[in-house]
Image (spheres, grey):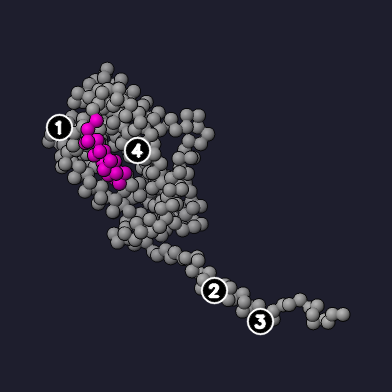
Amino acid sequence: MTSDNAAAPATAPPGDAENLSWKSAGDPSEAAARPIKVIGPPAFSLPTVFTGIRTLIQYSDLLYTLSLFRLHVRYKQSFLGWAWAVVQPLALMGIYTFIFSHVTTVATGGAPYPIFVFSALLPWIFFSSSITNSILGLVTYPNLLTKVYFPREIIPLSYLAAGLADFLIASLILAGLMIHYGVALTWNLLYAIPILLLIAGFASAIALFFSAVHVRFRDVGLAMPFVMQIWMFAAPVVYSAQSVPVRLRRIYLLDPVAGLIENFRRAVIYGTAPDPAALAISAAITIVALALGYAYFKSSEAVMADLV
């Protein structure tokens, strides 16, 4: 025979249950496991660049994941798949080769025009497509901005990383053209690596600045493809920088893209070292533009979730 006390379920007094609930909610170990990010009011400051870089490094795995996601979505349910990375430069190469070989002529310094124009189309398409796609990224995925915190620059930078993958794929076609036309390989080819990094840096500066502006003014996304079409003919893609009059060449090379594309072509096709003056100007403008563009992006980050 059991007693009533033994049969009664073991329950805590109401007061103790409240204390237990309060203790669980306010447990310091639980709070430490969920760090809180306080987003302050918008403020333009260059020191935020260094703070933003440190935070971006902590979220590098997210940047890697989103970059792979961009590539997967871009070629999902595509018949040609990764071949699309080379279709555009090959098609443009064919069109420009026909125009500038049969309709008119362009001084190429002795290089066959197909490889002359293709060596400039690769960095240009990487630059222009990265910017055009990156600017639209923040408004394409508004739920990411409003539901969880992460460095917002990861979204536009992931498009740039996907564009770099397309560039590397299309570089295989460039290597085939170099073999076909008997272009000699020299150690100066290694200059293409820092030049490509500078192109990526300047593309990041433009993408970060205008993606932040695009959150407020959607006209930016509509106008950017048109701007890129004009910019292409202002850069030495279908012609060489030597075609520009000497009196205007110094002003012309203030465009970092012009100096970087011309030096990329020199290192890859002609096997010569880059023009140090043009490369220095492009590098200086790229560094300043990247710092200012990133600082503006971080200053706008606080209100992006409200505007998107």
Amino acid type, label 4 = Phe
Q: CA distance from mark 3 to mark 2?
A: 18 Å
| Image coords of residue 188 (percent x, y) | 21, 36
Q: Up-down: is 2 above or below 114?
A: below
Do we see residue 1 in this rendering? Answer: yes
Q: Main secondary structure of the magenta part?
A: helix
Q: Which residue is mark 4?
A: 126
Amino acid type, label 1 = Pro
Instruction: Write the start and end of the magenta stretch as one range.
Output: 185-202
| Image coords of residue 221 (percent x, y) | 39, 43
Amino acid type, label 3 = Gly
Q: Which residue is mark 2?
A: 27
Q: CA distance from mark 1 to mark 4?
A: 27 Å
| Image coords of residue 90 (percent x, y) | 36, 26
Q: CA distance from mark 4 to mark 3?
A: 66 Å
Figure quadrant of residue 295: bottom left
Q: Nearer the viewer, residue 241 or 59?
A: 59
Sequence-wise first label, 1 or 4: 4
Frontmost of labels 3 and 2 is 2
| Image coords of residue 174 (percent x, y) | 32, 29
Frontmost of labels 1 and 4 is 4
